[in-house]
Amino acid sequence: MSDVAASPNRRRGIVSLTLMAGIMLVGLHIAIGLLTLVWLPYEPNAFTGGRLEGASLAHWVGTDRLGRDLFTQLMIGSRIALTVGLGAVAIGATIGVSIGILAAFASRWLDDALAATLDILIAFPTLLIAMLVVAASDTASLGSAIVALGIALSAIVARLTRILAKRVLVMDYITAARTSGSSWPKIVAIHVLPNIWPTLSVNFALQFGLAVIAEASLSYLGLGAPPPNASWGRMLQEAQGTVYTAPLGAIAPGIALVSLAIGVNLLADGLRARIDAARTLS
C-alpha cells in the first residue's frame, strides 16, 4: 500500500522538477532577452578584439572572424529567438484557432474539405512551407520569417482546435446552452474556448520551440533575420568555416539554441502533466 501511495507523490515530484527546469531555462533566456533592451557588453557590430580570439575576461565567449564579441551576439540571439517564437505562435494561434472553430461548426462537406486541406498542409515540413513563404516575399527579413513560420504552424493548430472543439460540441451543457437560447459566438466564448484552451496552451509551447529551431534553420540558409541581427542560425553559418580553429563560435550558439528548445519542451511536458493530473482529480 505504501508503494502505491508513494507512486503518485513520486510522479508529482518528477512533474514538478520537469516544470521547474523548463521555467528556469526559458526564464533565463527571457531575462537575457529583456536585458539586451537596456544593456549589452559591446555594440553588436563593433570590432572589439582580434579575429577568432578565445574566451577571456574581456570576451567571455571569444570573438568571431571579424573581431566582434560573441557573447553580445548570443544575447541578441536570445531576444530574436523569443521574438520569433512569440510572434509565430501568435500568428499561428490566431489563424489556426479561427479555422479550427470554423471547421467544427461547418457543414459536413465543408468540414471534410477543410480537414483534407489541413492534412495536406501538415504533410509538408514546417520549414519547407516557411521557406516558400519567405521566398515569395521581396526580401528576407525578421518580419517575413515570423509571418512565414506563423502561417506554417497554423495548420497544426487548426487541426488540433477542430478535433478538440468537436469533442466539446457534443457535450450535454452545449445542448443546454443552445436550448436556453445562447448564440453560437457566446457558446464559443463561454464554453468551447475555455475547455480547449489548456490543451492548446501545451501545443503552443511546443510550437514555440519548433518556431525557434525553424528560424535558426532559415537564418542558416540566409532566409531569416539579415545582418546586423545576430540570429543563432546565422552565427552557426558564419562559424562553420572556422569550427576547427575556433570551435566556440559554433558551440556557443548551438548550446543556446538547444537549451531554449529543451526548456520549452520541458515546460510543455510539465504543463501537460499538470493538466492531466487536474482532469484526473476532477
Image (cartoon, helix red, strand yellow):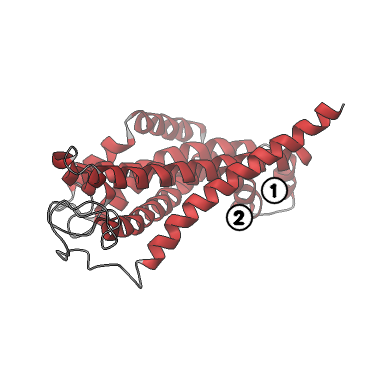
How far apart, in angstroms, are the residues tagged by discs 1 and 2? 13 Å
Identify the amino acid type marked 2: Ala
The residue beneath circle 1 is: 178
Residue 189: numbered disc: 2
Left or right: where does residue 238 sit relative to residue 30?
A: left
Q: Position of residue 138 (x, y in %)?
A: 14, 53
The vertical placement of 156 against 98, above or below, is above
**Which residue: 48% across, 47% down?**
97
Residue 164: numbered disc: none
Left or right: where does residue 1 sit relative to residue 44?
A: right
Whichever of callouts 1 and 2 sits on the residue coming sooner in the sequence is 1
Q: Position of residue 113 (x, y in %)?
A: 42, 32
Please state which of residues 197 and 186 is positioned toward the viewer in this rendering: 197
Q: Can residue 102 be seen at all in this image of the molecule?
A: no
Front disc: 1 or 2: 2
Q: Secondary structure at mark 2?
A: helix
**Which residue: 40% across, 66% down?**
34
Identify the amino acid type marked 1: Arg
